[in-house]
């Protein structure tokens, strides 16, 4: 399956899914979320697919939620838009699918990964990043939000509590080497290297292991470290709804789109 927002390409038993809104830094529209969910569902049902690569077209992995689309959604539906519902039916369903599909899922990060774009990469099983282009930032704090799409779970799991909280609060932008040092990415392709070739080589290696061992190993890790992940996503959605209920979200988004610094008032 290929759509305009997600391209799917098979090479042997490796399926590569490419986020394809490069003119928007692969920011997530509802269409792209739906198309990616469908692509993962098809991959899960296809026994011939033994490893999945997720990557972005152009200079970004993904810049997270499309903020212009978000403003349009708000304007159309006024205050009725529930961020928690948007999360439940979109990003939370997507990251649950990535965690539950019993095949290796590799995020290949060649450019910017921000907001829920980074969350989705963190929810993949492993991450490979290019020293040349990868650039990671949470970004949620800049628009008055809580890290969502599982990021508030994966950050402390991968980077540790203090380092995760630091990145969540500061939204500091880090490169591949620093991300590897913090445990956020597993492998770095050095400057001048070929991310696509390294990703293909690694994906083929994972696709060649016993599918039963691959599946049961992922199940074991999920059950050992994240048995309450689904419940946590629900809690995250509730916290996000609370964050989005105040004025800070629209101030933050307005500041970003207006290319100015946000001015958040005291609580
Ligand atoms: O309801 C719900 O489900 C809520 C859930 C929300 C989940 C989220 O993901 S919230 C977080 C959303 N994402 C962000 O806040 C990231 C915003 N973007 C940035 O911080 C920066 O743009 C980047 C770090 C991604 C890249 O920086 P840089 O300097 O390389 O590029 P730039 O100049 O900032 O951006 C280039 C263009 O892309 C620019 O448009 P222009 O001026 O060329 O017309 C910028 O506005 C646009 N852009 C970047 N990110 C987004 C975006 N447009 C829409 N949505 C974006 N997320």
Image (tube, helix red, strand yellow):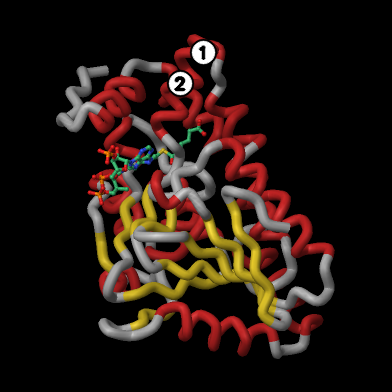
Along the horizontal axis of the image, is 7 left or right of 151? right
> How far across and how far down the image is residue 179, in percent?
32, 68
Quadrant housing the C terminus: top left
Q: Is residue 229 visible?
A: no
Along the horizontal axis of the image, is 246 left or right of 38? left
Along the horizontal axis of the image, is 143 left or right of 120? left
Identify residue for label 2: 72
The answer to whether marks 2 and 1 mark residues whose Cβ atoms lie closer than 8 Å is yes
* Nearest to the observer: residue 261 or residue 191: 191
Instruction: Judge: label 1 CB < 8 Å from ligand 1.
Output: no
Calculate the distance from the C-alpha at mark 2 to the C-alpha at mark 1: 6 Å
x 65%, y 59%: residue: 98
Quadrant housing the N terminus: bottom right
Dot 1 crowding, Cα within 10 Å, few <14, some 14–19, many 20+: few
Determine whether 243 is above or below 38 in the image: above
> How far across and how far down the image is residue 252, in percent?
28, 27
Dot 2 crowding, Cα within 10 Å, few <14, some 14–19, many 20+: few
x 33%, y 58%: residue: 136
x 74%, y 69%: residue: 102
Q: Secondary structure at mark 2?
A: helix
Q: Is residue 248 visible?
A: yes
- Ligand 1 is found in the corner quadrant, namely top left
Determine whether 252 is above or below 40 in the image: above
Identify residue for label 1: 76
* Nearest to the observer: residue 68 or residue 179: 68
> How far across and how far down the image is residue 172, in percent?
23, 52
> How far across and how far down the image is residue 121, in percent?
49, 60
Determine whether 68 is above or below 35 in the image: above
């Amino acid at each position: 399956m290929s759509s305009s927002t997600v391209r799917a390409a098979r090479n042997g038993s490796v399926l590569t899914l490419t986020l394809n809104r490069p003119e928007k830094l692969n920011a997530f529209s509802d269409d792209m979320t739906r198309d990616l969910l469908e692509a993962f569902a098809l991959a899960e049902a296809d026994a011939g697919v033994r490893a999945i690569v997720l990557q972005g077209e152009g200079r970004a992995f993904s810049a997270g939620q499309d903020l212009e689309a978000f403003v349009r959604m708000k304007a159309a539906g006024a205050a009725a838009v529930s961020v928690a519902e948007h999360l439940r039916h979109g990003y939370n369903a997507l990251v649950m699918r990535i965690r539950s599909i019993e095949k290796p899922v590799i995020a290949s990060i060649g450019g910017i990964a921000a907001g829920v774009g980074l969350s989705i990469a963190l929810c993949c099983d492993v991450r490979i990043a290019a020293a040349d282009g990868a650039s990671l930032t949470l970004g949620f704090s800049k628009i008055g939000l809580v890290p969502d799409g599982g990021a508030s779970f994966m950050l402390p799991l991968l980077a540790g509590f203090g380092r995760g909280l630091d990145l969540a609060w500061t939204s500091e932008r880090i490169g591949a080497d620093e991300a590897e040092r913090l445990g956020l990415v597993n492998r770095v392709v050095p400057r001048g290297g070929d991310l696509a070739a390294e990703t293909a080589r690694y994906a083929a290696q994972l696709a060649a292991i016993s599918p039963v061992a691959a599946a049961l190993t992922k199940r074991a890790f999920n059950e050992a470290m994240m048995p309450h992940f689904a419940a946590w996503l629900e809690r995250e959605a509730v916290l996000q709804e609370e964050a989005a209920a105040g004025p800070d979200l629209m101030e933050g988004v307005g500041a970003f789109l207006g290319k100015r610094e946000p001015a958040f008032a005291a609580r």
